[in-house]
Image (cartoon, helix red, strand yellow):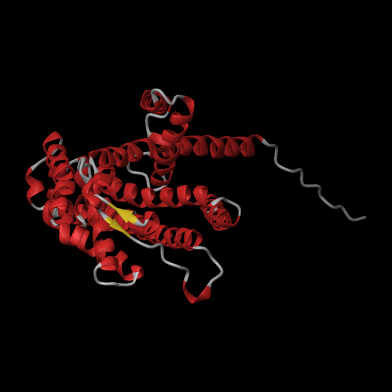
Amino acid sequence: MTSRLARHAGLLAVLALACMLPFVLSNFRLFQFTQVYIYAIAILGLNMLTGYNGQFSLGHGAFYAVGAYVSAIMMDRWHVPYGWTIPVAGVICLVVGFLFGLPALRLEGLYLALATFSLALAVPQILKYFEHWTGGSQGIVLSKPKAPLGLPLSPDQWLYFLTLAVLVILFWLGANLLRGRVGRAIVAIRDNHISAEAMGINSALYKSLVFGVSAAYTGVAGALSASVIAFVAPDSFNVFLSITLLIGSVIGGLASISGAIFGAFFIQFVPNWAQDISKAAPWAIFGVFLIVFMYVMPFGIAGAVGRIWIRMTRSRVLQAGRDPAPAHHAHTTT
């Protein structure tokens, strides 16, 4: 009980700190932290599929692109308010992901990875052909939305709070989903799908459903990025985006909800640090960072933090057990 209270208090403290950042950071730093939250949503979606369900994907950049373009087209062509485009992008990606997951049921391991990889290759090229809707190679230029209700916030500050709110809601929904009956079912399928089916779990349905939910999370992240960056273009969603999301998922910690946050910080800031260290070979430095992180923390950052927390709490329990009990003095009466 004490551990749960401490965890909740820590989460509230982190959330309070996050709410203070827009008033102390520059616009550029604020944009970076907004991108961290967007990446965290996408990584959590990928982690549901890969970490919890065991389906390997190299194509989630495609769903990110679909979400971004759905939002951009609705705002630019149909003048739909940006707030409505975010859930619509999520629903469309949910349907697309579910439908893609149905034929992918026959594929596993590297074969599924190649199928999703082809999706990441094809979608940016397909977007260039529908020039009337997507703007072709030139993309679509948007305007950053202003804060509603006359709130004294700049567009960057408002988008930061909007992204943070969506992040909190989706992480809460994801935590409840993964820690409930659905979460136990998809983990059972990952560990041994034959045993899971013997227990009455519909493996095909759950796999397709997880693929759809994973795509929906990534699509919502893409829709948010369209408003935050105020620009979408096919070349912004190349294969490297899918690989970057996978890197964030692994570095943060597979099958970990909090790992999505750590992984998002990694893919947002570490490439910048590598660029500062060596402008001649930044990706070589980034590769060194990857090797070091995977060697030092083979279960991801969340796994390392969890182990440290367990050791700290265990040492406190052992120390409390060693402390002598307080002496009880009897009161005598004369």
Q: Position of residue 141 (x, y in %)?
A: 32, 58
Q: Position of residue 86 (x, y in %)?
A: 31, 64
Quadrant of the snapshot with the C terminus: bottom right
* Residue that sits furthest to the right in the current view: 334
Query: Looking at the image, which residue is at 81% across and 49% down?
Result: 330
Using residue 162 as the reference point, say whether residue 325 is left or right of it: right
User: Is residue 216 among the parts visible in the rendering?
Assistant: no
Query: Can residue 48 be seen?
Result: yes
Q: Is residue 181 placed above or below 302 in the rendered structure?
A: below
Viewer-closest of 45 and 79: 79
Q: Position of residue 34 (x, y in %)?
A: 44, 52
Q: Nearer the viewer, residue 190 or 56?
A: 56
Q: Residue furthest front?
A: 138
- Nearer to the camera, 62 or 169: 62
The answer to whether 204 is drawn above or below residue 326 in the figure is: below
Establish if 84 lies above or below 155: below
Q: Quadrant of residue 115?
A: top left
